[in-house]
Structures are given as structure tokens and as C-alpha cells.
Amino acid sequence: MTTNKRIYLSSPHMSGHEQKFVKEAFDQNWVAPLGPNVNAFEETLAAYCGANHAAALSAGTAALHLALIMLGIQAGDEVLVSTFTFSASVNPIVYQGATPVFVDSENQTWNMDPVLLEKALKERKENGGTMPKAIIVVHLYGMPANMDRIMEIADRYHVPVVEDAAEALGSSFNGKKLGSFGAMSILSFNGNKIITTSGGGALLSNRQEWIDKARFLATQARDPAPHYQHSQIGYNYRMSNVLAGIGRGQMEVIEQRVAKRREIFQYYKQNLKDVSGISFLEEPDERYFSNRWLTTVLIDESKLGISPQKLQEELEKVNIETRPLWKPMHLQPVFEHYPKYLNGVSEKLFECGLCLPSGSNMSDSQLAKVLLALTACFGM
Ligand SMILES: *Cc1c(COP(=O)(O)O)cnc(C)c1O
């Protein structure tokens, strides 16, 4: 019997080990935003990503907010950030009263274009001399940005890099895990990410003082005193020990999750490679290793005979979820007035792209069903 269960873009995929750690939290009554699961999850994350320290937090957005605070970003400062991203990469800049300056993508990775980054830094230096205080580089859909070029340029201009690796846990560049390049990096464990704690995030860094400070700020900035004393504004950004238990169970299978997502990418590619008008984002060379969080395709309507919008509608009719690529931040009503360095790449990606169902819990028959639905739309 055929069932018509909805096929999602990326849904939570439990390993079966999560409840053991969650039960421990209950048994020990560590039902609080601190405890053994939080400590162990932090250690696992730091070791896995090759960073010296990690702080588990309530969200990736909270991690990015704390990273900007640690770098001293305040009202009037500028922060360079990829325009082709999810709004959470940019919101914390505005929380601080600072100004996002958007940098467009390169074709090879869809991530921050090093040429435009250099242009932005050069121009900002020449006009007035107040340099951007940070560069937020996003590794979108798991694909690494060109970290050789970006780190070289950032170092030359002495601007710290924050990696937004929310979508890129398990990806690497030059054999080094993403999240270990920047002065600080952030991860997300939202429900649709490669691993999840239902909601959560982490801040990574090699500098212990930053991670200690992040934990301090994330627990309302309580000064060491017998009473409650505060000399700074704090936040309530720590991760619950219950949710960190889910994270521990998820980290036990991270390599399987990455392998499965990469298999899904290969499946779509192998089966659609001869279709004219559909193309995949390749790893540009052997330095790039993507976790393939989502398989994304670009559609040439003139060759394929169907637009990405129509394709999304048709798949929706058979209960298959797809999604356009991220709408660039410089086109968002809330951000469109900010400065930007553009080359047309992200706008073209937004117009032509589509994300396909890529969850690591998809069955072979679900994958086959998506493929069949796609080829039916192409008149095959
Ligand atoms: C998911 C995501 C975030 C934010 O993570 P939350 O945990 O949802 O706050 C930030 N940046 C990118 C690129 C993301 O995809």
C-alpha cells in the first residue's frame, strides 16, 4: 500500500541514544541550564570541530550575538556579512546597533566572494578609515567558503572573522573542520539542522577568555559576590541540561549523518546529471568537503521547461516539501537600506535555485518518490 506521508526538507533524526542522556538529567535532577550534559556536550563539540573551547547556548543566533559583544561591536560600527544567508546571520549585528555591510557570493561556493570582500575592506579603509569590526562568513548549505582567501584578506586588514557554521557542522576545508578557522565560530542545533537539540547553538573559540566571558554574559552577567551583583548587561542564553542530553546522543552519530546527506546528494546528482537545465553545486576542488546539509539545484527554465516556483508547487501537490534558496539579505525590506557590495550572483541564485528534501532519515523509497516526482515535472 502506498502512503502519502509528507516528505520534509530536513526533519529531526534521533539516534536512539538521546533518551539515555535525557533520563540521566532527570535521574540526577539536573533540569537546569547547566549540568553534566552541558559540560560533556561542550567538550564533544570542541573536540570534534578542532576548537579549544565551546559554550553551549540557547540558539545559534544567541552565539552570534555573544561573539559580536566579545569583539566589542557597538552602535555605529560596521560588520561585513554574507548577503546570501538566513536572517539570523545579520540580526545580531542590528541588536548591537551596528551596521551590516553586505558582501555578495562567488559562483564556485555560493559563499562570500573574496574579491568583493577585499574591495569592501579597501574602500572602507580609503573612505574615512574606520574599519569594519568583524567579518561574518557563512558556510551556506554546508559548503565551505574559500577560507584560504578569506582568512588571508581578513588577516591583512586585521579584521577578525566569525564563522557562521550553523549549517556546516561536519564540513571541512583543507582537512580542517569548519568552525576552527575564525576567531570565533557559531553552530546551530535547530530542528532542521544536521543534528538538533530541538533548539540550541554553540560558540566555539581557541581563546578561553572569550568562552568564559560568553558563559558569564549568557547567565545574566553575575559578578562573583555572595549577593546578586551586576556591573554589565547580561543575557539568558545558556542551553538546558535536558537539551544538551539530546545533543550528546546526536553527536554519537554525526559522521553517519554527514555520510547519509552526502549519499543523498550523490543520488540526486547521479540520477539527474543528464537532464538538461538542472545543475548541482560541486565542491570546487579537493580542499572542499561539504556536509551536504541540503542538496540544492539550479534550474534553467529555458532548457528544463519549468520554473523553480512551478516545480515547488507541483511537488507540494504530492506532499513533498522543497524551498527556494535564501533570499539575499540586501533584498529584504528590513535590511535593504544598508550598504552592499554586489555582483549579481546571490540574486541569480535566489531566482534559479531550489532546495530538495535531504533529511538523513529519508528512506530509499522516499528518495525514489522525490526523484519520480521531479522527473514527472520535467516531462520524462
Ligand atoms: C539556522 C541558522 C542560524 C541560526 O541558528 P538558530 O539556532 O536558529 O538561532 C544562523 N545562521 C544560519 C546560516 C542558519 O542557517
Image (cartoon, rainbow, N blue to C red):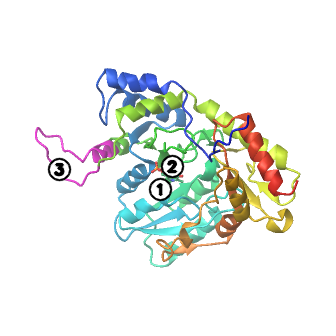
The residue indicated by pointer 1 is: 160
Residue 107 is covered by the magenta coloring: no
Residue found 42% across the figure and 24% down from its top: 21
| Residue type of the residue flagged with mark 2 | Gly
Q: Mark 3, residues whose alpha carbon is within 10 Å: few (<14), some, or many (≥20)?
A: few
The residue indicated by pointer 2 is: 182
Q: Is residue 1 left or right of residue 160?
A: right
Residue found 84% across the figure and 62% down from its top: 304
Give the foreground label among 2 and 3: 3
Instruction: Assess whether mark 3 and mark 1 are in contact (beta carbons under 8 angstroms).
Output: no
Instruction: Assess whether mark 2 and mark 1 are in contact (beta carbons under 8 angstroms).
Output: yes
Marks 1 and 2, how far apart at CA: 7 Å
Q: Residue 197 location in percent, x, y? A: 46, 38
Q: Is mark 2 within 8 Å of ligand 1?
A: no
Marks 1 and 3, how far apart at CA: 28 Å
The residue nearer to you, when weighing 6 against 17, is 6
